[in-house]
Image (tube, helix red, strand yellow):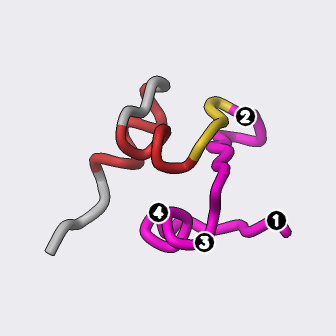
Amino acid sequence: MVLVTHDLAVARLLAHRLMVMRRGQVVETGLTDQILDDPQHEYTQLLVSSVLTP
């Protein structure tokens, strides 16, 4: 299944693997928890830092 979302919390719950794309190009791919806990690409870092925490 391919899930397209901008909601990283949903991605963490539903996906084992994650692919981050920017302007149609893959910038980072791998295990979801690994990418969201330790993003390597600057765009992924920006996405993760923009998530609101309760």
Q: Earlier in the sequence, mark 4 or mark 2?
A: 4
Q: Is residue 8 left or right of residue 30?
A: left
Q: Which mark is residue 14?
A: 3
Instruction: Name the secondary structure under disc 4.
Output: helix
Q: Which mark is residue 26?
A: 2
Residue 6, image quadrant:
bottom right
Query: Compared to 13, does 16 lie above or below?
Result: above
Name the front one of labels 2 and 1. 1
Q: Amino acid at mark 3?
A: Leu
Give the x, y percent position of residue 18.
64, 49
Query: Is 31 within the magenta?
Result: no
Residue found at the very far right of the displayed protein: 1
Give the x, y percent position of residue 21.
67, 42
Local crowd size for mark 1, using a 10 Å CA cut-off: few (<14), some (14–19), many (≥20)? few
In the foreground, 13 or 6 = 13
Q: Which mark is residue 8?
A: 4
Magenta part of the chain: 1-26
